Image (cartoon, rainbow, N blue to C red):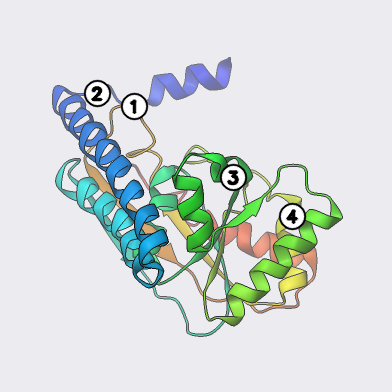
Amino acid sequence: MTQMANEAATTPIATLGDVLRSLAFYVLFYGGSIGLVAVAVAVLTLAPSRFRGYADGWSAYHRFCVRHLLGIRIAISGSLPEGPLLVACKHESFFEAIDMPRLIANPSVFAKAELMRIPLWGKAATAYGLISVAREQGAKTLRAMVTAARKLSAEGRPLVIFPEGTRVPHGQRPALQAGFAGLYKLLDLPVVPIAVRSGTIYHRRWKRRGTIQILIGDPIPAGLPREEIEARVLAAINALNSEEDA
């Protein structure tokens, strides 16, 4: 209760402009998404070679709506190296999940199994190359995830994971989920951490104008002990936690 009260006390009061811009965003982005996803699934059936372009178009449409309807700017620092890698991204809101194909070319994202059951979207996500993550991970499930991840990585696709496991309010830094270190060890890939400060602006009913900051960190080599990789990734993905709200 105390934490909720503190968050409520520090949450800026929405302006009329915030409300109107957010309503326009909800109607146009989510309404448009229904049509875009339906078209992508149809293209998957009729012209599979063109599917990825339509799927990436959904992410591009989201970026357009964020910029021009919500008045949110995106500031990106750093760049990804070439070659196979595992990207570990801070997760403060839906923004970075939807925006990932704009931030990283042809990503394959570890995503909750529940998302794969969303009508139409789940079919499109599976075809795009998202890797289903079951909450109760047995050995068989983990092997299936690693097999799928290795195949996609061999195709030259960056693997993306949200190591905290779920969205986390800005300023908080929980321990990484246990499965992250296991995947890191089994995949034997360098890790590129990404810090994101989106929660204070985007993860709200009435979204605010401002700047979403994205900081792409330096690569962390493969093969490190569990304690070291977890400590380094945790520090790197929280690099923007000390930044003041925009």
Q: Residue at x 54, y 43 (%)?
A: 115
Residue 90 point in image, percent of width and height: 51, 53
The amino acid type of the residue labelled 4 equals Gly
Residue corresponding to mark 2: 14
Of the numbered discs in the image, which one, if any, rests on residue 142?
Answer: none
**Dot 2 crowding, Cα within 10 Å, few <14, some 14–19, many 20+:** few
Q: What is the CA distance from the residue labelled 4 to the residue labelled 3?
A: 17 Å
Residue corresponding to mark 1: 205
Of marks 4 and 1, which one's residue comes earlier in the chain?
A: 4
In the figure, residue 184 lies in which quadrant?
bottom right
Residue corresponding to mark 3: 173
| Side of 97 where 192 appears, left or right | right
Q: Residue at x 31, y 52 (%)?
A: 39
The amino acid type of the residue labelled 2 equals Ala
Residue corresponding to mark 4: 179
| Side of 113 where 181 appears, left or right | right
Residue 128 point in image, percent of width and height: 47, 62
Q: What is the CA distance from the residue labelled 2 to the residue labelled 1?
A: 9 Å
Give yes or no for contact between labels 2 and 1 (Cβ–Cβ under 8 Å): yes
Give yes or no for contact between labels 1 and 3 (Cβ–Cβ under 8 Å): no
The amino acid type of the residue labelled 1 equals Arg
Q: What is the CA distance from the residue labelled 1 to the residue labelled 3?
A: 22 Å
Q: What is the CA distance from the residue labelled 3 to the residue labelled 2?
A: 26 Å
Q: What is the CA distance from the residue labelled 4 to the residue labelled 1?
A: 31 Å
Of marks 1 and 3, which one's residue comes earlier in the chain?
A: 3
| Side of 206 where 44 appears, left or right | right
